[in-house]
Image: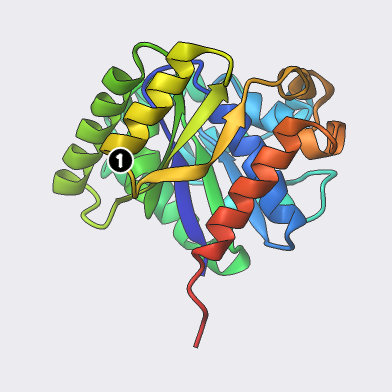
């Protein structure tokens, strides 16, 4: 039975897609069966995992709007153990089309229920806004991983997403929990970054991952090559940090039986 984790923050540019792609690849490298669900119309998680979006005939839009079987839409990536439910620009229209749909916030949840036995983890990359696509992801997930850039407005962004999670718990998904807060784009030479990191850890000691994602040039280069960081530069600090994050998640796994 898959563990479904939604990677979300209403603020853009905090490393959501970078985390979705690289954590998925790192978990796959640890021999876990992974499905990455791209719920962002920009489709960066799909292309970052090596998928040519221009050649796709179907995407997650067809699952949400046309009730297509997700198994017909899933794409196998060049990276062992990693499959993607991809996105194209068509998904931008889904936000409007879902407005009139019955049980519109649970469309993704129903689709993923058919797939859970085939994977160990399903990771969902969200758009940087609180619309129906993000609500579908939050309704489908067991937990939320919150990437947080070490910058001045970090706490404000965190309070917004925590408020949203609280509202989703009340109305849509009572079991939704916080998987963890992930500090991203960290530069230890920067006083503000260190202060923000300390403040987050002080306020959320149990929720904050031990692993920190550094600001790393190789991490920002990898998507343009359609490769997760570990297949682009395994020796980079970015690759090491996402492998560490995967280890942290795996250490939480509940033994079966």
Q: Quadrant of residue 10?
A: top left
Report the residue at 30% width, 22% height from top.
Answer: 155
Task: Give the residue at mark 1.
Answer: 204
Where is residue 231 drawn, in percent x and y? 85, 38
Where is residue 175 drawn, in percent x and y? 26, 57
Report the residue at 74% width, 37% height from top.
Answer: 239
Q: Quadrant of residue 154?
A: top left
Where is residue 240 drawn, in percent x and y? 73, 40
Res 246 seen here: yes
Vertical placement of residue 217 versus 183, above or below: above
Left or right, 229 with reference to 62: right
Where is residue 191 drawn, in percent x and y? 47, 13
Res 49 seen here: no
Left or right, 224 with reference to 46: right
Vertical placement of residue 221 versus 227, above or below: above
Element under disc 1: loop
Q: Please identify the residue farthest to the left as the structure is shown.
A: 170
Left or right, 207 with reference to 46: left
Q: Quadrant of residue 12?
A: top left
Mark 1: few/some/many CA within 10 Å (<14, 14-19, 20+) = few
Q: Please identify the residue farthest to the bottom as the structure is shown.
A: 257
Report the residue at 14% width, 46% height from top.
Answer: 170
User: Residue 129 or 98: which is nearer the viewer?
Assistant: 129
């Amino acid at each position: 039975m898959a563990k479904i984790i939604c990677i979300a923050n209403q603020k853009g540019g905090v490393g959501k897609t970078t985390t979705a792609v690289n954590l998925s690849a790192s978990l796959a490298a640890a021999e876990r069966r992974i499905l990455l669900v791209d719920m962002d119309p920009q489709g960066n998680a799909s292309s970052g995992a090596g998928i040519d979006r221009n050649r796709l005939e179907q995407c997650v839009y067809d699952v949400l709007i046309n009730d297509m079987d997700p198994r017909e839409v899933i794409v196998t990536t060049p990276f062992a153990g990693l499959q993607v439910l991809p996105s194209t620009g068509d998904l931008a229209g889904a936000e409007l089309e879902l407005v009139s749909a019955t049980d519109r916030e649970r469309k993704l949840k129903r689709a993923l229920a058919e797939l859970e036995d085939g994977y160990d983890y399903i990771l969902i990359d969200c758009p940087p806004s609180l619309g129906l696509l993000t609500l579908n992801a939050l309704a489908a997930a067991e937990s939320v991983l919150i990437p947080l850039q070490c910058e001045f407005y970090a706490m404000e962004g965190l309070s917004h997403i925590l408020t949203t999670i609280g509202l989703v718990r009340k109305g849509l998904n009572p079991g939704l929990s916080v998987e963890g807060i992930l500090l991203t784009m960290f530069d230890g030479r920067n006083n503000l970054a260190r202060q923000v990191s300390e403040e987050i850890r002080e306020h959320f000691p149990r929720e904050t991952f031990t692993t920190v994602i550094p600001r790393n040039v190789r991490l920002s280069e990898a998507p343009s090559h359609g490769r997760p960081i570990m297949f682009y530069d395994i020796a980079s600090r970015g690759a090491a940090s996402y492998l560490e994050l995967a280890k942290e998640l795996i250490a939480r796994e509940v033994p079966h039986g």
